[in-house]
Image: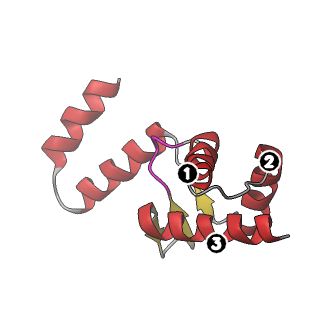
Amino acid sequence: MAKTADCIAWLEFFVKSVGDHQPEKGCIHLPSCFSRSDIYKKMLEENTVLNQPTVSLSHFYNISEKHFSHVIIPKVIQLLFLILSYLIRGGHFIVCFFIFNLIN
């Protein structure tokens, strides 16, 4: 039980540290360079250095799904379209046109 609580606390800190809150969508985006297994490995490394026990990878995934379903790791293409929509709203049409032509 202590390992589960420690995992939840670690994930809360991690998400607050690197997450990008999306208030209009009610979720938090983590950088696309991460995967869930990368995050687990980071937690495992830190716990190993501190000589702390760590939940298994499967339990980590269960915790992630149960307590952090609002945390999303967007695919790179989704992130690109978010950037494009932001640029369009800002009136940066030439930049959007250039980026769009690069990906097509």
Viewer can see residue 19: yes
Q: Residue at x 67, y 58 (%)?
A: 52
Q: Which residue is mark 1?
A: 49
User: Where 78 falls versus 60 (above or below)?
Assistant: above
Task: Give the magenta part as a residue range.
Answer: 30-34
Q: Which mark lies nearer to you, 2 or 1?
A: 1
The secondary structure that dominates the magenta segment is loop
Specify how the rendered protein is coloured.
Answer: secondary structure
Q: Which residue is mark 3?
A: 9
Q: Residue at x 39, y 52 (%)?
A: 82
| Distance from the alpha carbon under mark 2 to that under mark 1 | 17 Å
Q: Which residue is mark 2?
A: 56
On the rendered image, what quadrant is the N terminus found in? Answer: bottom right
The secondary structure type at the circle numbered 2 is loop
Viewer can see residue 68: no
> Looking at the image, which residue sits at the far right?
1
Name the spot of residue 61 as percent of width and height, x first.
Answer: 76, 51
User: Where 30 falls versus 38 (above or below)?
Assistant: below
Answer yes or no: do the residues labelled 3 and 2 have beta carbons within 8 Å?
no
The secondary structure type at the circle numbered 1 is helix
Q: Residue at x 75, y 72 (%)?
A: 5
* Kind of residue indicated by mark 1: Val
